[in-house]
Structures are given as C-alpha cells and as structure tokens.
Amino acid sequence: MIRISDIIEEFIKEMIAENEKDVTEIQRNELANHFSCAPSQINYVLTTRFTTEKGYYIESRRGGGGCIKISKVEYVENQPLADVILDKIGESITYDGGAKIIDALRESEVISCREMNILKSVINDRTLGLVNDYRNKIRAEILKSSIMAIML
C-alpha cells in the first residue's frame, strides 16, 4: 500500500523534473490542502526525503504565505559534487549516514549499482568490526577516498 509520504515525495519530484532548472517553489499550506493532510506531513517529507545526502537543497522563506524552494543539485562537473560530499561526510560518519550518501549517488546516476554495492559492503559494521573505537572515523576516510577515486 502506498503511503501519503510516498505520494507527496513523487509529486514534488515530478514538479522539480518539469522545471528545466531542477528547482521548484511550493507553499507548504497549499501542498497540504492539495493532499488533504496536515502541513506537518509536508515538513516530514521535506526533512526526510529531500536531504542534502539525497542531492537536494531546501530554502525556506517566511512571510507572505511562506515559500519553500527545493533544488535538485545536478552537477555538470564532478568536482563541486565531490566537495559537497566530502564536506557532508566530515571526519566521522555512521553506516546509515554513509549509506544515504551512497544511495543518493546511485539515484543521481553518479555511480553504478555495482559501485553502490561495493561501497556499502566496504563501509558496513561487519567489515570494520575490529576497529570499534575508530569505526566511524575510518568509515569516513574509506568513503571519502573511494568516492573521490570513482569520481576523478
């Protein structure tokens, strides 16, 4: 059964895809009325489905009814993407955080399905089992160096 969150997500993705600049502006209350749901449901979808890890940038403007601008970050060159990813990974990252970044790279077709599976297996907790104290730091370094090798 399809959940309302999935429907809202697909609707917003379609709106973004229809715009030649991969940007759309929505009003939270109007979108909530369109789907007959609470505005908090729109917030939930935006905060969980349109994250920077998944390749989206959200700006929120207050006043005048409020407007939310959602941008799909498309990269003509890989260097800007690499900078964003390296910044997002930082010095330490959990498996879930790393997996979200990997999934976003796959969804954006930056990496192949095979590369996605390799990256996920390399950063999983089983692979890093012997380095408990430094697991998230080592995972971050492995993920950063692997992504850079793929993108360069």
Image: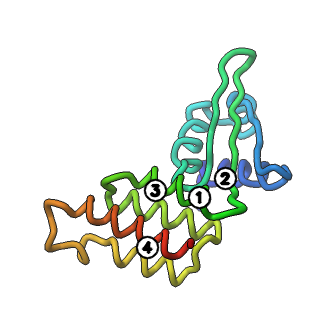
146 sits left or right of 105 in the view: left
What residue is disc 4 on?
146
The first of marks 2 and 4 along the sequence is: 2
Of residues 88 and 82, the one nearer the viewer is 82
Which residue type carries mark 4? Ser
What residue is disc 3 on?
86
Q: Secondary structure at mark 3?
A: helix
Which residue type carries mark 1? Leu
The first of marks 2 and 1 along the sequence is: 2
3 and 2 marks in contact (CB < 8 Å): no
The first of marks 3 and 2 along the sequence is: 2
The first of marks 3 and 4 along the sequence is: 3
Q: Secondary structure at mark 4?
A: helix
What residue is disc 1 on?
81
Q: Within the image, what quadrant is residue 23 found in? A: top right
The residues bearing labels 3 and 2 have C-alpha atoms spaced at a distance of 15 Å
Of residues 115 and 43, the one nearer the viewer is 115
Placement of 120 over or under 88, stated as above or below? below
Q: Within the image, what quadrant is residue 143 found in? A: bottom left
